[in-house]
Amino acid sequence: MIYLDNCSTTKPREEVVKIMYESMMDNFGNPSSLHRLGMKAEKRIREARKYIADFLKVDNNEIYFTSGGTESNNIAIQSFVNKMEKRGKHIITTKIEHPSVLNIMKYYEKHGFHISYLNVDEYGYISLEELRNSLRDDTILVSIMHVNNETGSIQPIEEIKNIIKEKNPNTLFHVDGVQGFGKIDISLKASGIDSYSFSGHKIHGPKGIGGLFIDKKHVISPIVFGGNQERGLRSGTENVTGIIGFGEAVKIMSEKYKEERQYVFELKEYFGNRIREEIDDIRINTSLDENSSPYILNISFRNVRGEVLLHYLEDKDIYVSTTSACSSKGTEKSHVLESMGLKDEEIEGAIRFCFSYENTKKDLDYTVEVLKESVTEIRQIIMR
């Protein structure tokens, strides 16, 4: 099997699976219980929180556990809007955000807020000048993803924050970091980010567990109420096993991510160049330099339906995706590629390849050969 859908989810590392199994057997106590088993579970949660806080170079009490990136985005954005709406009802985001952000914005639009959606260029980068011109006295929040989940474009987070600080220092800044966490360097403190979301299953950890950084200078109200777990921000019995697995994944990642990132960057560059040289009539939608994530490569094969090509590859035990996993079962075309100005045939023929440390050049050589054969066959069928 050649798995190239690592943006959708990653295979958990063996060490993560092992420690999760052990935790289910030995750390099954409720962390809120006062007896020894509860205290043992609570200790393991503290350890995992520290691994993540140390990796992000923030304080332990600035890290909150959630069920994943979608919930983290919802908690941050809705809590900030609830806190700030008396100051204004203007929010800035981009046209290429994840649905967990865009759908929140649609909700607030229906409730009297004005949302400014920043445009992007042909490779998915915002205009800093447009951002500057969009900021107003009543702008309460800017929400921009660090790394786009479909094309891998990396937004200049520090420059964005500098512009916000210059134009309206009262505006809060949320960053969707799900595709960037552990893959693209970022300094939350130096960048002045107010909140940052991330997820376990994108870094070879378990599904159903995520995290949210909120700068400790902010006191915000929860959007879910209950037993006051996670210091009252996210009530509900903690996912102890998931948290322990998440912490282990971050612990391993902190030791290996720079080496793995360089390895994956070389794989992406090699793969992209081979496809560009050996397959005609394509459009590479991701830059092959360091301005995009080493882990993501989006390519349009003209006169080919991406969904058909995906199944051709699947028949050869190669797994890719056509768009983000959260949107792939819908009928609408990619809002990201549409915002980048791609033609319909380029959007329909887009495939997203997402790499990991487990992939090899041999894997990619085989994938290129299968792609060449499949694209040729599909085009011949279409042209008949």
Image (spheres, rainbow, N blue to C red):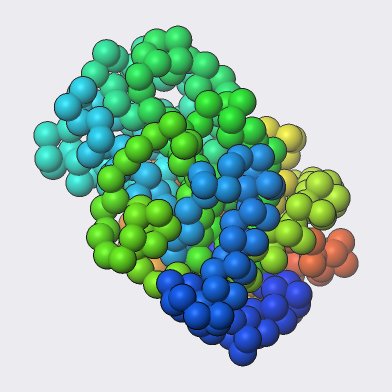
- Residue 244: x and y in percent read 61, 70
Q: In the picture, which quadrant includes the N terminus?
A: bottom right
How many numbered circles does the render carry?
0
Q: Nearer the viewer, residue 215 or 26?
A: 26
Q: Nearer the viewer, residue 307 or 318?
A: 318
Please give left or right for residue 49 compared with residue 237 in the image: right
User: Going 59% across and 85% down the picture, which residue do you hit?
Assistant: 24
The one nearer the camera, 203 or 40, is: 40
Answer above or below: position of 189 versus 61. above
Q: Is residue 228 left or right of residue 7?
A: left
| Residue lying farthest to the top in this orientation | 166
One can see residue 98 in this view: yes
- Is any atom of residue 321 visible in this view? no
Near-viewer residue (23 or 358): 23
**Quick check: 329 above or below 101?**
below
Instruction: Locate residue 157: give its quadrant.
Output: top right
Q: Residue at x 53, y 26 (%)?
A: 192
Q: Quadrant of residue 138?
A: top left
Q: Residue 262: horizontal and vertical position, in percent?
A: 83, 46
Give the percent coordinates (x, y) of residue 322: 52, 61
Q: Is residue 59 above or below residue 251?
A: above
Q: Position of residue 336 (x, y in %)?
A: 44, 44
Residue at 48% across / 59% down in the picture? Answer: 65
For the point 50% across and 80% down, the residue is: 35
Residue most extreme to the bottom: 25
